[in-house]
Amino acid sequence: MDYVVGISWPRSGHHLIVRLLTLYFGPSFGYCEYHAGQPTVPGIDSCCRSVPCRHKDVVALTKNHDFDLQAPQIPGQKYLIQYRDFIPSVVSNFELHIRNGAPDSAISFREFASKEFSRYRAFMAKWVASDFGRDQLQLSYKDLVADPAAQLARTVAFIAPEQEVDMDRVTDAVARVDGEKIERARIQALQGVGVHADRDVTAFRWYEPRLFGTLEHLNLDRGMVMQTFEDILGRKPAETNILGFQCLESREELEKQLRASEEYRQRTASRTSEGSSASGKD
Protein backbone atom coordinates (compact mmCIF):
# COMPACT_ATOMS: atom_id res chain seq x y z
CA MET A 1 0.00 0.00 0.00
CA ASP A 2 1.10 3.55 -0.72
CA TYR A 3 0.93 6.26 1.92
CA VAL A 4 -1.85 8.76 1.12
CA VAL A 5 -2.49 12.14 2.73
CA GLY A 6 -6.22 12.51 3.37
CA ILE A 7 -7.47 16.08 2.97
CA SER A 8 -11.16 16.52 3.68
CA TRP A 9 -13.72 19.25 4.12
CA PRO A 10 -15.62 18.50 7.38
CA ARG A 11 -18.64 16.20 7.02
CA SER A 12 -17.56 14.92 3.59
CA GLY A 13 -17.51 11.21 4.39
CA HIS A 14 -13.94 10.80 5.60
CA HIS A 15 -14.82 8.44 8.45
CA LEU A 16 -17.10 6.52 6.09
CA ILE A 17 -14.32 5.86 3.60
CA VAL A 18 -11.96 4.94 6.47
CA ARG A 19 -14.48 2.38 7.79
CA LEU A 20 -14.91 0.98 4.29
CA LEU A 21 -11.15 0.73 3.73
CA THR A 22 -10.70 -0.93 7.13
CA LEU A 23 -13.30 -3.55 6.25
CA TYR A 24 -11.70 -4.10 2.85
CA PHE A 25 -8.04 -4.31 3.85
CA GLY A 26 -8.40 -5.59 7.41
CA PRO A 27 -5.63 -5.15 10.02
CA SER A 28 -3.03 -4.25 7.38
CA PHE A 29 -4.69 -0.86 6.88
CA GLY A 30 -2.91 1.66 9.13
CA TYR A 31 -4.72 4.94 9.79
CA CYS A 32 -4.10 8.09 11.84
CA GLU A 33 -6.76 10.73 12.47
CA TYR A 34 -4.20 13.52 13.02
CA HIS A 35 -6.64 15.94 14.71
CA ALA A 36 -7.52 13.37 17.39
CA GLY A 37 -4.08 11.85 17.38
CA GLN A 38 -4.28 8.09 17.99
CA PRO A 39 -2.98 5.89 15.15
CA THR A 40 -4.47 2.43 14.67
CA VAL A 41 -1.05 0.85 14.18
CA PRO A 42 0.25 -1.09 17.22
CA GLY A 43 3.47 0.34 18.60
CA ILE A 44 2.79 3.97 17.62
CA ASP A 45 1.66 5.74 20.76
CA SER A 46 0.65 9.11 19.33
CA CYS A 47 0.29 11.09 16.12
CA CYS A 48 3.52 12.65 14.83
CA ARG A 49 1.45 15.62 13.58
CA SER A 50 3.58 15.85 10.45
CA VAL A 51 2.72 16.00 6.76
CA PRO A 52 3.81 13.63 5.36
CA CYS A 53 3.49 11.16 8.23
CA ARG A 54 6.76 10.01 9.79
CA HIS A 55 5.32 6.48 9.98
CA LYS A 56 4.25 6.24 6.34
CA ASP A 57 5.88 2.83 6.06
CA VAL A 58 3.02 1.43 8.20
CA VAL A 59 0.35 4.16 8.02
CA ALA A 60 -1.61 4.11 4.76
CA LEU A 61 -3.91 7.11 5.30
CA THR A 62 -3.93 10.18 7.51
CA LYS A 63 -6.71 12.69 8.12
CA ASN A 64 -6.32 16.45 7.77
CA HIS A 65 -9.05 19.10 7.46
CA ASP A 66 -6.43 21.78 6.69
CA PHE A 67 -8.34 24.26 8.85
CA ASP A 68 -5.62 26.92 8.51
CA LEU A 69 -4.89 26.15 4.84
CA GLN A 70 -1.25 25.50 5.73
CA ALA A 71 -1.07 21.81 4.77
CA PRO A 72 1.64 21.43 2.12
CA GLN A 73 1.02 20.31 -1.44
CA ILE A 74 3.99 18.01 -1.97
CA PRO A 75 4.91 17.08 -5.56
CA GLY A 76 4.91 13.32 -6.02
CA GLN A 77 2.89 12.67 -2.84
CA LYS A 78 -0.53 11.04 -3.16
CA TYR A 79 -3.56 12.85 -1.71
CA LEU A 80 -7.16 11.73 -1.24
CA ILE A 81 -9.26 14.90 -1.38
CA GLN A 82 -12.83 14.68 -0.06
CA TYR A 83 -15.40 17.41 -0.41
CA ARG A 84 -19.14 17.96 -0.32
CA ASP A 85 -21.66 20.45 -1.67
CA PHE A 86 -21.78 23.45 0.64
CA ILE A 87 -25.40 23.29 1.82
CA PRO A 88 -25.56 19.67 3.06
CA SER A 89 -22.08 20.02 4.55
CA VAL A 90 -22.94 23.17 6.51
CA VAL A 91 -26.19 21.63 7.80
CA SER A 92 -24.32 18.53 8.97
CA ASN A 93 -21.45 20.52 10.46
CA PHE A 94 -23.89 22.78 12.33
CA GLU A 95 -25.01 19.72 14.29
CA LEU A 96 -21.44 19.34 15.56
CA HIS A 97 -21.23 23.10 16.13
CA ILE A 98 -24.11 23.03 18.62
CA ARG A 99 -22.69 19.87 20.17
CA ASN A 100 -19.69 22.03 21.07
CA GLY A 101 -21.93 24.52 22.88
CA ALA A 102 -23.19 26.93 20.23
CA PRO A 103 -26.86 28.05 20.38
CA ASP A 104 -29.31 25.95 18.38
CA SER A 105 -31.30 28.71 16.70
CA ALA A 106 -32.11 30.06 13.25
CA ILE A 107 -29.87 33.11 13.69
CA SER A 108 -27.04 30.93 14.98
CA PHE A 109 -27.31 28.77 11.86
CA ARG A 110 -27.28 31.86 9.60
CA GLU A 111 -24.13 33.17 11.25
CA PHE A 112 -22.46 29.75 11.12
CA ALA A 113 -23.26 29.33 7.41
CA SER A 114 -21.98 32.83 6.67
CA LYS A 115 -18.66 32.15 8.37
CA GLU A 116 -18.29 28.63 6.97
CA PHE A 117 -18.69 29.81 3.39
CA SER A 118 -15.47 31.82 3.49
CA ARG A 119 -13.54 28.76 4.71
CA TYR A 120 -15.33 26.50 2.23
CA ARG A 121 -14.48 28.68 -0.75
CA ALA A 122 -10.82 28.85 0.24
CA PHE A 123 -10.67 25.07 0.78
CA MET A 124 -12.27 24.35 -2.60
CA ALA A 125 -9.95 26.76 -4.39
CA LYS A 126 -6.84 25.16 -2.87
CA TRP A 127 -7.76 21.48 -3.00
CA VAL A 128 -10.49 20.93 -5.61
CA ALA A 129 -10.21 23.63 -8.29
CA SER A 130 -6.40 23.89 -8.34
CA ASP A 131 -4.15 22.11 -10.83
CA PHE A 132 -2.53 20.26 -7.92
CA GLY A 133 -5.88 19.09 -6.58
CA ARG A 134 -7.13 17.91 -9.95
CA ASP A 135 -4.10 15.64 -10.29
CA GLN A 136 -5.04 13.81 -7.07
CA LEU A 137 -7.88 11.41 -6.24
CA GLN A 138 -10.91 13.61 -5.58
CA LEU A 139 -13.93 12.04 -3.93
CA SER A 140 -17.19 13.93 -3.54
CA TYR A 141 -19.61 12.88 -0.82
CA LYS A 142 -22.46 12.88 -3.33
CA ASP A 143 -20.65 10.32 -5.50
CA LEU A 144 -19.59 8.26 -2.49
CA VAL A 145 -23.13 7.70 -1.22
CA ALA A 146 -24.63 7.39 -4.72
CA ASP A 147 -22.27 4.58 -5.79
CA PRO A 148 -20.16 3.51 -2.80
CA ALA A 149 -18.86 0.35 -4.47
CA ALA A 150 -17.41 2.24 -7.43
CA GLN A 151 -15.88 4.94 -5.22
CA LEU A 152 -14.41 2.42 -2.78
CA ALA A 153 -12.92 0.50 -5.71
CA ARG A 154 -11.32 3.72 -7.03
CA THR A 155 -9.88 4.47 -3.61
CA VAL A 156 -8.54 0.94 -3.12
CA ALA A 157 -6.81 1.08 -6.51
CA PHE A 158 -5.30 4.46 -5.60
CA ILE A 159 -3.94 3.30 -2.23
CA ALA A 160 -2.85 -0.19 -3.32
CA PRO A 161 -2.07 -0.03 -7.05
CA GLU A 162 -0.04 -3.24 -6.78
CA GLN A 163 -3.19 -5.22 -5.92
CA GLU A 164 -6.12 -6.17 -8.12
CA VAL A 165 -9.35 -4.79 -6.66
CA ASP A 166 -11.49 -7.58 -5.20
CA MET A 167 -15.08 -6.54 -5.98
CA ASP A 168 -16.52 -9.22 -3.70
CA ARG A 169 -14.73 -7.62 -0.75
CA VAL A 170 -15.84 -4.19 -1.94
CA THR A 171 -19.48 -5.29 -2.06
CA ASP A 172 -19.25 -6.90 1.36
CA ALA A 173 -17.71 -3.77 2.92
CA VAL A 174 -20.39 -1.52 1.45
CA ALA A 175 -23.17 -3.80 2.71
CA ARG A 176 -22.04 -4.04 6.32
CA VAL A 177 -20.21 -0.80 7.09
CA ASP A 178 -21.35 1.07 10.19
CA GLY A 179 -23.17 4.37 9.75
CA GLU A 180 -23.63 7.48 11.87
CA LYS A 181 -26.40 10.01 12.40
CA ILE A 182 -25.80 13.42 13.96
CA GLU A 183 -28.77 15.58 14.87
CA ARG A 184 -29.54 18.08 17.63
CA ALA A 185 -26.10 17.62 19.20
CA ARG A 186 -26.52 13.84 19.48
CA ILE A 187 -24.38 11.26 17.67
CA GLN A 188 -26.13 7.96 16.99
CA ALA A 189 -24.07 4.97 15.86
CA LEU A 190 -25.80 2.83 13.23
CA GLN A 191 -24.17 -0.58 13.27
CA GLY A 192 -23.96 -2.61 10.09
CA VAL A 193 -26.50 -0.53 8.14
CA GLY A 194 -24.37 -0.09 5.05
CA VAL A 195 -23.98 3.19 3.17
CA HIS A 196 -27.12 5.30 3.43
CA ALA A 197 -28.42 8.13 1.25
CA ASP A 198 -27.37 11.76 1.62
CA ARG A 199 -29.23 13.94 4.10
CA ASP A 200 -32.49 15.63 3.06
CA VAL A 201 -31.78 19.26 3.93
CA THR A 202 -35.47 20.17 3.71
CA ALA A 203 -35.98 18.10 6.87
CA PHE A 204 -33.51 20.29 8.78
CA ARG A 205 -35.31 22.15 11.58
CA TRP A 206 -34.03 25.56 10.43
CA TYR A 207 -34.78 24.94 6.78
CA GLU A 208 -36.62 27.73 5.02
CA PRO A 209 -36.82 27.86 1.21
CA ARG A 210 -35.81 31.49 0.87
CA LEU A 211 -32.83 31.10 3.22
CA PHE A 212 -31.56 27.97 1.48
CA GLY A 213 -32.06 29.64 -1.89
CA THR A 214 -29.74 32.37 -0.63
CA LEU A 215 -27.15 29.80 0.46
CA GLU A 216 -27.05 28.48 -3.11
CA HIS A 217 -25.83 31.86 -4.39
CA LEU A 218 -23.18 32.85 -1.85
CA ASN A 219 -20.19 34.53 -3.46
CA LEU A 220 -18.47 37.06 -1.19
CA ASP A 221 -16.50 36.43 1.99
CA ARG A 222 -18.17 37.44 5.23
CA GLY A 223 -15.10 39.35 6.40
CA MET A 224 -15.03 41.46 3.26
CA VAL A 225 -18.73 42.34 3.64
CA MET A 226 -18.17 43.33 7.27
CA GLN A 227 -15.15 45.49 6.43
CA THR A 228 -16.92 47.22 3.54
CA PHE A 229 -19.81 48.15 5.83
CA GLU A 230 -17.36 49.54 8.39
CA ASP A 231 -15.52 51.54 5.72
CA ILE A 232 -18.62 53.08 4.13
CA LEU A 233 -21.29 53.19 6.84
CA GLY A 234 -19.14 52.98 9.96
CA ARG A 235 -21.02 49.98 11.33
CA LYS A 236 -21.47 46.26 10.98
CA PRO A 237 -24.38 44.87 8.94
CA ALA A 238 -27.28 43.21 10.73
CA GLU A 239 -26.70 39.47 11.05
CA THR A 240 -30.01 38.77 9.28
CA ASN A 241 -28.79 40.66 6.20
CA ILE A 242 -25.20 39.45 5.82
CA LEU A 243 -25.97 36.34 3.76
CA GLY A 244 -27.88 38.44 1.24
CA PHE A 245 -24.93 40.79 0.79
CA GLN A 246 -22.64 37.78 0.36
CA CYS A 247 -24.63 36.89 -2.76
CA LEU A 248 -23.59 40.05 -4.60
CA GLU A 249 -21.33 39.74 -7.63
CA SER A 250 -18.42 41.78 -6.33
CA ARG A 251 -17.15 44.14 -3.65
CA GLU A 252 -17.65 46.98 -6.13
CA GLU A 253 -21.35 46.12 -6.39
CA LEU A 254 -21.64 46.08 -2.60
CA GLU A 255 -19.92 49.46 -2.35
CA LYS A 256 -22.24 50.85 -5.03
CA GLN A 257 -25.35 49.70 -3.17
CA LEU A 258 -24.15 51.07 0.16
CA ARG A 259 -23.27 54.45 -1.34
CA ALA A 260 -26.71 54.61 -2.97
CA SER A 261 -28.44 54.11 0.39
CA GLU A 262 -30.25 56.82 2.32
CA GLU A 263 -28.10 55.98 5.34
CA TYR A 264 -24.94 56.82 3.38
CA ARG A 265 -26.41 60.10 2.09
CA GLN A 266 -27.36 61.13 5.62
CA ARG A 267 -23.94 60.10 6.94
CA THR A 268 -22.20 62.10 4.22
CA ALA A 269 -24.45 65.13 4.77
CA SER A 270 -23.80 64.99 8.50
CA ARG A 271 -20.06 64.90 7.96
CA THR A 272 -20.28 67.83 5.53
CA SER A 273 -22.36 69.81 8.02
CA GLU A 274 -19.93 69.09 10.84
CA GLY A 275 -17.05 70.16 8.64
CA SER A 276 -18.77 73.42 7.72
CA SER A 277 -19.55 74.18 11.37
CA ALA A 278 -15.94 73.60 12.35
CA SER A 279 -14.74 75.91 9.56
CA GLY A 280 -17.17 78.63 10.65
CA LYS A 281 -15.86 78.55 14.21
CA ASP A 282 -12.33 78.99 12.93
Image: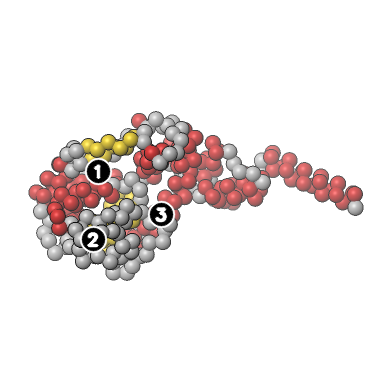
Residue under circle 3? Answer: 67
Residue at the (44%, 46%) spot, across then down: 116
Secondary structure, mark 1, is: helix
**With 15 as the anchor, is 86 left or right in this view?**
right
Measure the alpha-carbon separation of dots 1 and 3.
24 Å
Of residues 140 and 236, the one drawn nearer to the viewer in this rendering: 236
Mark before the other along the chain sequence, 2 or 3: 2
Measure the alpha-carbon separation of dots 2 and 1.
32 Å
Residue 44, labelled with which disc?
2
Q: Which numbered disc, 2 or 3, marks the residue closer to the eye?
A: 2
Residue at the (33%, 35%) spot, across then down: 186
Residue at the (15%, 49%) spot, across then down: 23
Secondary structure, mark 3, is: loop
**With 144 as the anchor, is 167 left or right in this view?**
left
Of residues 204 and 190, the one drawn nearer to the viewer in this rendering: 190
**Residue type at tag 1:** Val
- List x then y, in percent, for residue 234: 67, 46
Crowd tier of the residue under label 1, counting other residues whose Cα lies within 10 Å: few below 14, some 14–19, many 20 or above: some
Residue under circle 1? Answer: 145
**Residue type at tag 3:** Phe
Mark before the other along the chain sequence, 2 or 1: 2
